Amino acid sequence: MTSPSLPAALRAALDAKLEGLSRQDAAGRAALISKTYRDGGSSIAIKSEIDALAYALVRMPATYAAIAACLNALVEERPDFAPKTLLDVGAGPGTASWAAAEAFASLENFMLLDINPALQKLALELGRDHPRLGAMTCRRDPDALDDVDAADLVIASYLIGEVSDAERSGLAERLWTKTREVLLVVEPGTPAGYERIIALRRDLIARGAHVAVPCPHDLPCPLQPPDWCHFAQRLPRLRAHIQLKGAELPFEDEKFSYVVLMREAPAKRAARVLAPPDVGKVEVAAKLCTAGGVAIAKIARRDKAAYATARRWRWGDAVAEWI
Ligand SMILES: C[S@@+](CC[C@H](N)C(=O)[O-])C[C@H]1O[C@@H](n2cnc3c(N)ncnc32)[C@H](O)[C@@H]1O
C-alpha cells in the first residue's frame, strides 16, 4: 500500500527549497493560488519559482494522497500490473510521478509533460536526487503529448479541468492513444469533477477501454444527480502547509473522483463502497456500486462473520463478495 503521506525524500526536498524563503511572501502567494482555484481558475496563476513552491506546499500533499489512493485501488484489483514506463501529463511539480514511483518499483522511465515552466523546473529540482525520478524527462511544448512514446501507465491528475470544454474530449483520446496498458485520470471530488470523469469514461469505453477501478462494470454510471461518485482520503498536513494555509487541524480530507481504464478486459471486478457505511447495533448498511447497479447492502449482526467483515468496510473500499 502506498502511504497517503508525501515520501520523506520529497518532504526533505520541499523543506530544502523553503530555506531562506519569506514565509509571509509564500503564504500570500499560497492564498492567492488557493483563491484562484476556488474561483474556478487554473494553474496559469503560477508564474514564479515562489508561486510553484507555494502550490507544491498547499496542494501537492492532497493531490498526492488522492493519486496514492487511486493507485492502491488499482494495485488491489490488478496486483500483477508492473509498468516500466510512466507518462505524467499535466505533471505540475511531479506529484503523480512520485506516487507512481512509490506504488510501482517496476517503473524505470518517467516522462513528465507540463506547459508551465515554473512547475516543470520545480518537478526537476524536487526529483533530482531520487534514484529513479532523477532521470526523468520533462517537456513543455504544447504538442509534446502527440510526439512522445506511448507508456505502460499514463496519469492525468487534476489536469482535465484545466482545459476548455471544447478541448477535453480530444485530450481524452490523445491520452488513450498514448496508453499501452493503464490510464488513470483524477479530478477534484466535486459534481463538476465527477462530470468530467464520467464523460471521459464514456468516450473511452466507446473506444474499447475497460474500467479497472472504481466501477465494477463498463456500463453507464448508475448514479443520478444530485448524487455523484467521489471518494475521500485523509492526509497529514506538513508544518509549512499549516503555516501557509493558516490551518488549525493537522490533517485534511481530500475529496476526489477518478477512473482507471485499461486495454485488457478484466476477468472480474469487485463492488465498491460509495459512501461511509452506517454501522449500527443491529446491522451495517452500506451503499455499494455492484455489477448490477447501486445497492444498499444490509448485513445483520446475527450473521457474525459477515458483520465483522462489513464493520471494517470504508468508503472507497473494494468488496469482493458483493460482485
Ligand atoms: C492542478 S495542476 C496538477 C498538477 C499535478 N498533476 C498534481 O496532481 O498535483 C494542473 C497542471 O496541468 C498543467 N496543464 C494545464 N494544461 C495543460 C496542457 N494542455 N498540457 C500540459 N499540461 C497542462 C498545468 O500547467 C499544471 O501544472
Image (cartoon, rainbow, N blue to C red):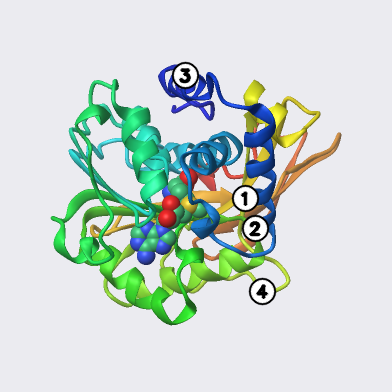
Q: In terms of secondary structure, where does tag 3 sit? A: helix
Identity of the residue drawn at 37% across and 33% down: 98
Mark 1 and mark 4: Cα distance apart in space: 33 Å
- For label 1, the residue is 33
Mark 3 or 4 closer to N-term? 3
- Please, what is the three-letter code of the amino acid marked with disc 4? Gln
Mark 2 or 4 closer to N-term? 2
In the displayed orientation, state which residue is furthest to the bottom.
166
- For label 3, the residue is 16
Mark 1 or 4 closer to N-term? 1
Q: Residues within 10 Å of mark 3 (few under 14, many from 20)?
A: few
Q: In terms of secondary structure, where does tag 4 sit? A: loop
Location of the N terminus (image quadrant): top left
Mark 1 or 3 closer to N-term? 3
**Residue 36's disc number:** 2
- Is residue 33 found left or right of 159 in the rendered image? right
Closer to the camera in the image, 250 or 56: 56
> Which numbered disc, 1 or 4, marks the residue closer to the eye?
1
**Residue 224's disc number:** 4
- Please, what is the three-letter code of the amino acid marked with disc 3? Ala
Q: Residues within 10 Å of mark 1 (few under 14, many from 20)?
A: many
Identity of the residue drawn at 61% across and 60% down: 229
Mark 1 and mark 3: Cα distance apart in space: 21 Å
Quadrant hosting residue 308: top right
> Which numbered disc, 3 or 4, marks the residue closer to the eye?
3
List x then y, in percent, for residue 77: 38, 42
Mark 3 or 2 closer to N-term? 3
Closer to the camera in the image, 13 or 148: 13
- Reply above or below: 241 against 269: above
List x then y, in percent, for residue 248: 81, 29
User: Does residue 311 show up?
Assistant: no
- Reply above or below: 165 against 259: below
